[in-house]
Image: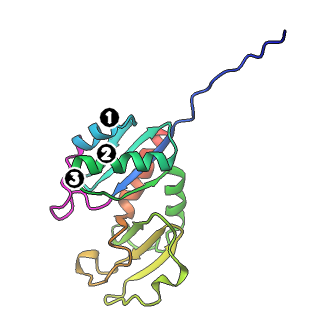
Amino acid sequence: MTWRITRRYAPRVGTFVAFLRAINVGGTGILPMADLVKLCEKARFTHVQTYIQSGNVLFTSRSGASTVKATLEKALAVKLGKPVGVHLRTSVELDALLAANPFSAAAPNRVIVMFLDAAPTKDVLAAVKRPGGEELAVRGRELFIHYPEGQGASKLKVPFADVGTGRNINTVTKLAAMAHALD
């Protein structure tokens, strides 16, 4: 009789950064960051951390991205009583998008990354009017927007504003560094 010895290895732990849409912005989707940490821990995510009050959370999980996204969206909907968009990225994806920033010469607080679930079509920016000299570029699942006069002064109607969520390059850079610390 031949015996086969097998070992079961735990699945690799992945680090995820979740960018939540419409959390703690303009009085909508109020969610204290301490509550967000508890919600994520209850969802069985580990090493949970938040960064600033605008719906940024990072954590590790043994589940894949689609399961993590569905779990977090469900938990947020239960907690807030309405759907909340979740856009997940890994540290590797954040590094790649920072390297692909077409406006890297601009002040990082004047460049916004709009996170999307899927890559938009190439012609999506053709009809966009840029009233303040704003520059827009699509790179993969992200829309980069350079606001030369600042976002607050802009009258730009941002494509995908109803489904995506934006963060400035300073925030994305900080979250990428925090994610690398968990990797």
Say the numbered circle drawn on residue 75.
2
Q: Amino acid at mark 3?
A: Gly
Magenta segment:
21-34
Is label 3 in a helix, a strand or a loop?
A: loop
Q: Is 37 inside the magenta-drawn segment?
A: no
Q: Amino acid at mark 2?
A: Ala
**Horizontal relation, residue 157 to residue 29: left or right:** right
Q: Main secondary structure of the magenta part?
A: loop
Q: Are marks 2 and 3 in contact (CB under 8 Å)?
A: no
Measure how far apart labels 1 and 2 are at the Cα level.
9 Å
**Horizontal relation, residue 42 to residue 28: left or right:** right
Q: Are marks 1 and 2 in contact (CB under 8 Å)?
A: yes
Give residue 149's quadrant in the image: bottom left
Label 3: how many Cα within 10 Å (few below 14, some 14–19, many 20+): few
Mark 3, mark 1: which one is toward the viewer? Answer: 3
Q: Position of residue 144 (x, y in %)?
A: 44, 72
Q: Residue furthest left?
A: 27
Look at the image and tell me whether residue 84 can be seen.
Answer: yes
Residue at 79%, 12% in the rendered image: 3
* Number of numbered discs on residues: 3
Depth check: 75 or 129 in front?
A: 75
Is label 2 in a helix, a strand or a loop?
A: helix
Say the numbered circle drawn on residue 42.
1
Depth check: 181 or 72 in front?
A: 72
The quadrant the N terminus occupies is top right
Measure how far apart labels 2 and 3 are at the Cα level.
10 Å
Residue at 61%, 26% in the rendered image: 9
Measure how far apart labels 3 and 1 are at the Cα level.
17 Å
